[in-house]
Structures are given as C-alpha cells and as structure tokens.
Image (cartoon, coloured by chain):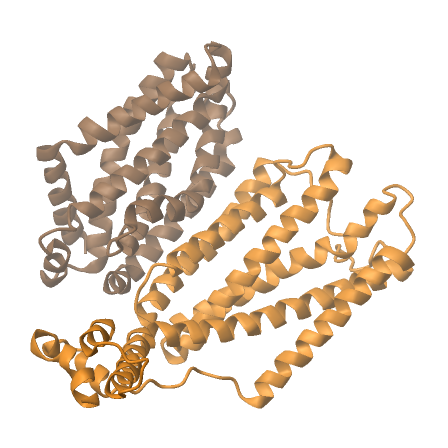
C-alpha cells in the first residue's frame, strides 16, 4: 500500500522526466557547513569587531574633545574615513583581486567568485554608509546635503557600478556561467574606475584633502583624536572582514540550495506521501478516505 | 580579422538599410528627447543653449542603448548568434564589425541631433572641428563599450532592463568629456581647453577596444 501510493504519481508520462530518477531515490547532499576552526575564527573576529566598534564609539563621543572649528561635528571623522577606506579601497580592491584570480585560468575556482560577490555586497553597505555619513557632515559644513564634488561623485558612480554587478548576479544562471559573466562585468567596471576618477576630478573638486595620509605622511591631527581615528579604521576593517565571512558562507549555502532545491522539494513531497499512506493504511478514527490522501500527496 | 569585421559591419548595415529601424525609430526618439529636454528647461533660450552640450550627449547615450539593443536583437532569433560563431568568423572581427556598424549609425544620428541642438536650442558652435572630433571619439567609445555589454547581456531574458543600468555608468566619462569639449567649442575657446578631454576619450576608446578585441570570444561563450 505504502509503496503504491508513493510511486503511482510518477508512473506514466511523468516517469520519463529526467528528474524522476532523483525523486524515486532521493539523496540530497547536506548543506555546506564550515569547519570548527572557521566557525571559531568567525566568532572571534565578530567579537573583536563588536568590541572595537564599541570602543570607538565610546572614545569618539565621550573621551575625545570637540574641535575648535567644527565642534562636535568633528566626531564624524572617527567613522567617515574608516567607512570610506573599507568601501573604496578594501572592498573594491578585494573584489578586483578575486575577480582577476577567478579569470586567471590557473586559479579559477568558485571560491574567488563568491569572495568577489561577498566583497561587493558588503562594499555596497559601506559605500552607502560613506555617502550618508559624508552627507550628515556636509550639511552643516558646506551647507548642502550633496555637492557635486569629484570624490563624492566618483563614490556615487562606484556605488552604481557595484549595484549593477549585484543586479547581474541576481539573474538566475548556472554558478559557472554566472561567475564568468560577473567577472567580465567586474573587469570592465574596474577598468573604468581610474578613467571615471580622472574625468570627475577634472570636472570638479572641492573635497578636503586626506588628513592622515598626506604627502609627507605626518598626520595633521594629534593625541586622543588620532588614536580614536586609528581604532575606528581597525574596528571597521574587522566589521568588514566579519561581514565578508558571513556573506561568503551564506553565498555557499545559496548555491547549494539552488542546486538542490528540486531534489529537496521532491524528497519532502515523497515524505508527505509516505506519511499520508501510513495514515491511510491505519484504520484509526483519524484516517479519511484513501483517495483524498492520494490527491494531497 | 579586418575582412571579418568588414563583412559583419556590412551585414548589420545592410539589415539597417532594409529595416530602417534606427532611422525610423531611434532617430525620432532622439529628437523627442531633445524636445522633452526643452520642455523640462523651460522656454528660455539662454538656459537651453547653455545646457545644449550636456543634453546632446544625454540624448546620444539614450540612443546608444537603443542602437545596442537593436544590434543584439538582430542576432537573437533563429540561432543567428550560433550561426555566426559556427561560420568561423574571428571573434575579434565580429566585435569590431558590430562596433563599426553601431558607430556608423550613431554618427548619422549625432549629425541629426547636432542640427536639432543648433536649431531648437539656439546653440552657437564656434569651433566645428572640435565638435566633429569629439563626436567621432565619443561614438567609438560608446560603440566599443556598448557592443561588449550587448554581447554580455545577449543571452539574458532581462536584457532590456539590465543593459542600460550596466552600460550608462560605464559611459559616464564619454558624457563628461563630450560635454566639456562641446562647451569649449561653443565658447570659441582655444583648442587647448578641450585637449585633455580629447586625450581622455582616446584612452577610453583604446582601452575598451583592446579589451573587446581580446575578450569578445570568451564573452560570447558566456552568453
């Protein structure tokens, strides 16, 4: 009885379906799970990121003095350059390097593709934070939320390029095809970045120069402010690394799900059928008519 | 490579010659865009003349998207793309041919739009040769990048919506450079005002043409 009920729907025309073999003998590989070391590393980095961020906030808001000219507004300096560093250099650089490593035939592996995707996605978050924190600082300082300054404009263009990359990745495709396609788009965009940078620079510039890394490498701020700024950089970098690790892990699970979705669904239906047939063959008071059960299965 | 390019370009231009899609749909769209820009900026001729360079290039960018869509769609049915690949045509030649065909159509379109800008917005051009050079270089850049992205998105069902999103930010330097050169040409400035922008366009064109020639084969395999 049990056997009949589960196999009947698959006989006839459905039995010729390429997936029917998988359905009658469903075996779904388990989802990828990180090793204990990887999980522990992720936790430690997450914890450090949390502590670092909390310390930066504490130092930035309560310990450091307000600026002579900018007042309390100067406290944004502990966040904004750090966020921008992650968004514009770390995330973008990592995405570019992993894309190149993916395109290079000897190092081609989905690992680099997923890493690039994770870097871009986390980079987008940081990029938006850069623009928002810059805006908050710009309104009282420049008097406008947004200025068509060179650095702001190229950051915004970079964001749009990243979003395009993410949109392309959302198009359903085999992981290999998607990886190649995304790698090409990332490459074309990466080539464009310096050109955009120069063109926008010539177009308009009024942003203040870099404070920490100026030409002779002597920071123009001192004391507790410099330390807080430095800590902010470290903390935000850790936050980036942590988010990157988590996003990579989710990416691997997503790929696994996309590959096994059908098998999983079939296994579930099959299990339902088995359960239903058990209820049907059980002459207890809860059992309904067997034909209804077949319909459900 | 060059012979293949000429063959492919000839094929695409012949299709255009017979179907007249660019002439009867894309060009009128460009004119409509110019009229809409005029509505948006109000009837003040001075404002319009001032904005003319940028508006011209934005209209060109929009038309480029349409021209690229068309260039991709002529090969999307009846397995034409696979046929082209099977015909033994060099991918680099195919790339250059398609880019040349798009560029040729865009040049005609730009001539029309330039006349439109002069007539409708009252833009006064002092140095015509700078306009011509900027249009030529800008068009090469747009065709070079557009053909790449067209091939990349050719197999996608969401091509129509994704292509503009991917292509337009990449083409931003062409818009910036083209606009600045036009402004210099309209102000009657010395050619040196536009030289660095012309150089930028040359670099942009060279980089993307080189990338296309090298990578068009692998890109086709992806689509």
For this rendering, which residue is in front, A34 or A101?
Answer: A34
Quarter of the image where the N terminus of chain B is located = bottom left
| Image vertical order of residue A228 relative to residue A262, above or below | above
| Image vertical order of residue A127 relative to residue A233, above or below | above
Inspect this view and state whether residue B125 appears: no
User: Which residue shows up at 46% across the image and 30% down it?
Assistant: B179
Report the residue that reaches farthest toward the front. Answer: A285
For this rendering, which residue is in front, B184 or A4?
Answer: A4
Q: Position of residue A182 (x, y in %)?
A: 38, 62
Number of marks? 0
Residue A184 horizontal side relative to residue B46, left or right: left
For this rendering, which residue is in front, B126 or B13?
Answer: B13
User: Which residue shows up at 29% across the image and 45% down it?
Assistant: B160
Classify residue A267 by image quadrant. Answer: bottom left
Classify residue A218 by image quadrant. Answer: bottom right
Q: Colour of chain B?
A: brown
Residue A12 horizontal side relative to residue A267, left or right: left
Classify residue B79 by image quadrant. Answer: bottom left
User: Which residue shows up at 27% across the image and 34% down it?
Assistant: B106
Residue A118 horizontal side relative to residue A75, left or right: left
Residue B11 horizontal side relative to residue B48, left or right: left
Chain assigned orange: A
Inspect this view and state whether residue B156 appears: yes
User: Which residue shows up at 36% across the image and 76% down it?
Assistant: A105
For this rendering, which residue is in front, A166 or A198?
Answer: A166
Q: Position of residue A162 (x, y in %)?
A: 48, 55
Quarter of the image where the C terminus of chain B is located = bottom left
């Amino acid at each position: 009885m049990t056997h009949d009920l589960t196999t009947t729907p698959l006989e006839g025309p459905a039995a010729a379906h390429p997936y029917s073999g998988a359905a009658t003998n469903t075996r779904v590989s388990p989802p990828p799970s990180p090793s204990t070391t990887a999980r522990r590393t992720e936790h430690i980095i997450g914890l450090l990121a949390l502590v670092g961020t909390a310390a930066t906030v504490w130092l930035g808001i309560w310990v450091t003095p307000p600026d002579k000219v900018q007042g309390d507004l100067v406290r944004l300096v502990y966040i904004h350059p750090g966020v921008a560093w992650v968004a514009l250099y770390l995330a973008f650089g990592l995405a570019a390097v992993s894309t190149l490593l993916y395109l290079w035939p000897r190092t081609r592996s989905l690992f680099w593709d997923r890493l690039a995707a994770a870097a871009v996605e986390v980079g987008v978050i940081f990029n938006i934070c850069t623009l928002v924190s810059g805006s908050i600082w710009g309104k009282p300082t420049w008097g406008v939320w947004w200025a068509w300054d060179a650095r702001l404009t190229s950051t915004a263009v970079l964001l749009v390029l990243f979003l395009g990359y993410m949109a392309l990745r959302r198009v359903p495709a085999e992981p290999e095809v998607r990886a190649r396609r995304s790698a090409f788009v990332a490459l074309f965009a990466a080539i464009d970045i310096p050109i955009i940078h120069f063109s926008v620079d010539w177009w308009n510039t009024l942003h203040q120069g870099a404070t920490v890394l100026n030409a002779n490498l002597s920071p123009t701020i001192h004391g507790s402010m410099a330390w807080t700024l430095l800590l902010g950089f470290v903390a935000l970098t850790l936050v980036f690394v942590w988010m990157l690790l988590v996003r990579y892990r989710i990416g691997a699970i997503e790929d696994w799900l996309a590959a096994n979705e059908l098998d999983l669904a079939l296994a579930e239906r099959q299990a339902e059928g088995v359960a239903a047939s058990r209820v049907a063959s059980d002459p207890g008071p809860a059992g309904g008519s067997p034909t209804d059960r077949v319909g459900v299965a | 490579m060059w012979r293949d390019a000429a063959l492919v370009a000839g094929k695409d231009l012949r299709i255009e010659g017979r179907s007249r899609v660019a002439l009867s749909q894309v060009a009128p769209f460009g004119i409509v865009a110019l009229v809409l820009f005029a509505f948006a900026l109000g009837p003040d001729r001075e404002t319009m003349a001032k904005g003319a360079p940028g508006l011209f290039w934005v209209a060109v960018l929009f038309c480029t998207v349409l021209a690229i869509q068309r260039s991709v769609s002529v090969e999307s049915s009846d397995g034409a793309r696979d046929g082209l690949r099977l015909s033994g045509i060099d991918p680099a030649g195919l790339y250059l041919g398609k880019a040349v065909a798009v560029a040729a159509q865009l040049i005609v379109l730009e001539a029309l739009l330039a006349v439109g800008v002069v007539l409708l917005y009252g833009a006064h051009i002092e140095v015509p040769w700078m306009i011509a050079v900027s249009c030529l270089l800008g068009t090469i850049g747009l065709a070079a990048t557009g053909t790449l992205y067209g091939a990349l998105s050719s197999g996608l069902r969401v091509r129509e919506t994704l292509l503009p999103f991917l292509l337009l930010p990449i083409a931003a330097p062409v818009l910036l450079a083209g606009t600045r050169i036009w402004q210099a040409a309209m102000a009657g400035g010395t050619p040196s005002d536009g030289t660095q922008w012309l150089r930028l366009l040359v670099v942009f064109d060279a980089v993307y043409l080189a990338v296309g020639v090298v990578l068009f084969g692998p890109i086709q395999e992806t689509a």
